[in-house]
């Protein structure tokens, strides 16, 4: 948590009511690795095993846990355990970090009775500080003894770092007429410009799906949610998104990722991930405004996303919105610097429903006061058409305030 423990003004009312999911048990503990007076260790166990899919950071300085998850995913084996610690990222800690991580992996495997390559692990927090594996291992017997199917709120809270609120989402979907459950929780507030998924996010379903199909659904949903958000343009060394399917709900044989029977599940799964991703943005460090940016008229969807992220990551755009200054010239600048095709004289910018530019200049009848009024709200909507073709994309970000500096200037203290 932040030092002030002031909850983001953009926070939702609270966590949803998580239903139990067959085959999933969770437990938390306080190791005092970094934080005092709160749980900072999460264990999830899958008694009968769970099919697992994942999308992981593309950072070239990825943490030891990310490398291990990538290795275990490649085996295609069922997952039996998940261990997450908050406060220490175990990133850039060399062979000593690998050794500390494997100590915890083997300890959990022994505690729940499975092979080491059936355990997944995540760490989040400060980079460059060696993980104290003994502090974690000392709590594993207790944490395993306390595993329960209803510990979802505690699980969502235990993985937080600078977050000001826990993030969770719940959905149900139909596959071949069978209702299946989907629960998810995530953490993230700063170092948010995912190049895969997001900082840490975990999704659980009782649907009976093979790994290749779950992976296809997860990758598509990540691209339309976590890979379309940014807080500060910085991609974490620890970004991890894992999905687990226990198979407790039998949905019949599914062999094709695009089977029509999966249509509702795929759509609902994407909706849940988008919800979680939006919550991450709403908890952006120092954030006071949630910003949706839609770019149309681009050369293709990829180009539209590049332009949208150029706008979303611009400190000048983000600070102008924080200051409630309708300086649309900064949006023009961000479009131009993106390096993608754009027609200057066809460029149209719309802020809060009001057209701002047309024919290469300010729109006739442009009312700056109306734009300023929109920027005084918490939910900001920007639309940009670059006048080239039909490519489109939507991304989400937040404003940039002095609060971001306050949080990150003393992050390690």
Image: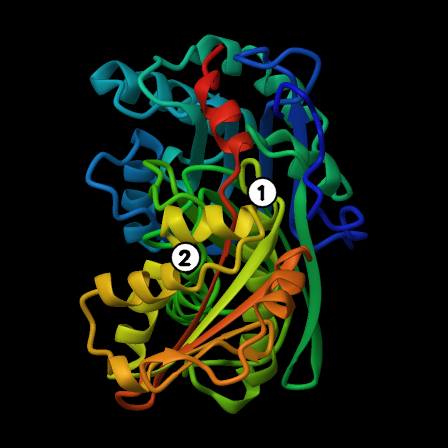
SS at mark 1? loop
Residue 171 in sight from this viewpoint:
yes
Left or right? Give the position of 71 relative to 371. left
* C-beta proximity under 8 Å, tags 1 and 2: no
Left or right? Give the position of 221 relative to 153. left
Q: Quadrant of residue 174?
A: bottom right
Residue drawn where x is 63% and y is 30% of the image: 158
Residue 365 in the image, given as x and y percentages of width and height = 54, 83
Quickly name the residue at label 1: 287
Residue 325 in the image, given as x and y percentages of width and height = 53, 54
Q: Quadrant of the N terminus?
A: top right
Left or right? Give the position of 48 relative to 51. right
Residue drawn where x is 34% and y is 49% of the image: 56
- Tag shown at residue 130: none
Residue drawn where x is 70% and y is 59% of the image: 170
SS at mark 2? helix
> Quick one: label 2, few (<14), some, or many (20+) residues within 10 Å?
many
Observer-nearest of 344 and 108? 344
Up the image or down, 45 lies above or below 41; here it is below
Quickly name the residue at label 2: 312
Residue 199 in the image, given as x and y percentages of width and height = 45, 42
Up the image or down, 172 lies above or below 290; here it is below
- Residue at far front of view: 365
Residue 9 in the image, given as x and y percentages of width and height = 71, 43
């Amino acid at each position: 948590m932040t030092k002030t423990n002031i909850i983001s003004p953009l926070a939702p009312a609270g966590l949803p009511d998580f239903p139990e999911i067959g085959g999933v048990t969770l437990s938390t503990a306080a190791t005092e690795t970094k934080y005092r007076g709160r749980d900072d260790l999460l264990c999830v166990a899958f008694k009968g095993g769970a099919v697992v899919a994942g999308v992981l950071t593309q950072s070239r300085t990825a943490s030891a846990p990310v490398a291990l998850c990538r290795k275990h995913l490649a085996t295609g084996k069922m997952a039996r355990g998940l261990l997450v610690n908050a406060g220490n990222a175990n990133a850039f800690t060399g062979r000593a970090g690998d050794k500390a991580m494997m100590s915890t992996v083997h300890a959990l495997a022994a505690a729940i009775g499975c092979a080491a390559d059936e355990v997944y692990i995540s760490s989040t927090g400060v980079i460059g500080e060696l993980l104290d594996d003994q502090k974690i291992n000392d709590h594993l017997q207790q944490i395993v003894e306390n595993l329960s199917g209803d510990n979802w709120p505690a699980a969502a809270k235990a993985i937080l770092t600078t977050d000001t609120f826990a993030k969770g989402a719940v959905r149900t979907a139909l596959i071949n007429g069978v209702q299946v459950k989907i629960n998810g929780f995530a953490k993230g507030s700063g170092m948010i410009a995912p190049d895969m998924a997001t900082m840490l996010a975990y999704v659980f379903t009782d649907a009976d799906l093979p790994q290749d199909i779950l992976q296809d659904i997860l990758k598509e949903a990540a691209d339309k949610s976590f890979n379309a958000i940014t807080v500060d343009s910085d991609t974490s060394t620890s970004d991890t998104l894992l999905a687990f399917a226990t198979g407790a709900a039998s949905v019949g044989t599914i062999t094709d990722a695009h089977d029509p029977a999966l249509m509702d599940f795929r759509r609902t799964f994407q909706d849940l991930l988008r919800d979680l991703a939006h919550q991450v943005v709403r908890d952006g460090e120092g954030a006071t405004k949630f910003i949706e940016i839609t770019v149309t008229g681009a050369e293709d969807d990829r180009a539209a996303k590049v332009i949208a992220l150029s706008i979303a990551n611009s400190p000048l755009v983000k600070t102008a919105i924080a200051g409630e200054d309708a300086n649309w010239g900064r949006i023009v600048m961000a479009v131009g610097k993106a390096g993608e095709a754009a027609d200057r004289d066809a460029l149209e910018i719309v802020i809060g429903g009001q057209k701002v530019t047309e024919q290469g200049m300010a729109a006739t009848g442009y009312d700056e006061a109306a734009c300023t009024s929109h920027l005084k709200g918490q939910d900001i909507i920007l639309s940009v058409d670059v006048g080239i073709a039909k490519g489109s994309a939507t991304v989400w970000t937040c404003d940039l305030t002095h609060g971001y500096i306050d949080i990150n200037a003393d992050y390690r203290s």
